[in-house]
Image (cartoon, helix red, strand yellow):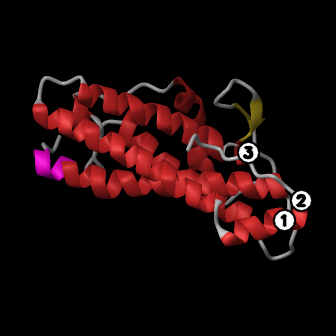
Amino acid sequence: MVTLNHGQKQKYIESHLFNELRWLLGAAQEWSIQEQLSLGIVGYDVIVYAMDSAFLHARSLFEFFVCGPTKNHYSCKQFVGDVLKSEKYKNWNEPLHANLMHARDRSKTEQLEGFRGEMKPLNKMPVDFAEEILGLWEKFEENLLGSRSQGDRELGRLAQQKRKAAIDCAKCVIDSEVTRQHAELKHEQLKPVFPF
């Protein structure tokens, strides 16, 4: 396992983890907006792009939080001494991987247990994945903040700041001019996914 120094950990949180989280939350928010609006405009497949993006970024973050490091990616184990646990991801891992990595009929997806326990198809789960990742991110923060090491506690505060910044970025999606125009056309009051 590669050992990271404080500066490398800081850069990894600031750049890589933050980018994954902000793109995940933004994509999940966009997917939710498109789901709420049901625009049905031929050739305007933003809901599919948002879903795929949310799945991709969620999978990257799940691998960071719940899997050990490999030659291809770091793990939270290198930050907090162990991987985090996600019972939900144990059930989501295989279908999520298959959906992302293999050409297949996406119209027939199996039912999975959502974040709040309800059954739903995989293609309705971008927000569920984002909510589970936010929970894992907060556990990651807590582990860092609870450390005896001042450097780890600094990383914990950085992780908190980056989580809040990613949520703020997702707010920009719901506040965008395009979103407002589409909501007005459909006479919809859009509901944000994440607490702002």
Is tag 1's residue or tag 3's residue first in the polypeptide sequence?
3
Amino acid on which the number 1 mark rests in the picture:
Glu
Task: Please name whichever residue, 63 or 53, is drawn nearer the observer in this view of the structure.
Answer: 53
Q: Residues within 10 Å of mark 3 (few under 14, many from 20)?
A: some
Report the residue marked by disc 2: 187
Report the residue marked by disc 3: 124
Give the Cα distance between marks 2 and 3.
23 Å
Image location of residue 20, percent across then percent down: 43, 54
Outermost residue on the bottom side: it is: 43
What's drawn in magenta, residue-wise? 4-9
Asked if disc 1 and disc 3 are in contact, CB closer than 8 Å, the reply is no
Asked if disc 2 and disc 3 are in contact, CB closer than 8 Å, the reply is no
Quarter of the image for residue 110 reads: top right
Quarter of the image for residue 174 reads: bottom right
Give the Cα distance between marks 1 and 3.
24 Å
Q: Main secondary structure of the magenta part?
A: helix
Task: Please name whichever residue, 106 or 5, is drawn nearer the observer in this view of the structure.
Answer: 5
Q: Is residue 79 shown above or below 190?
A: above
Report the residue marked by disc 1: 184
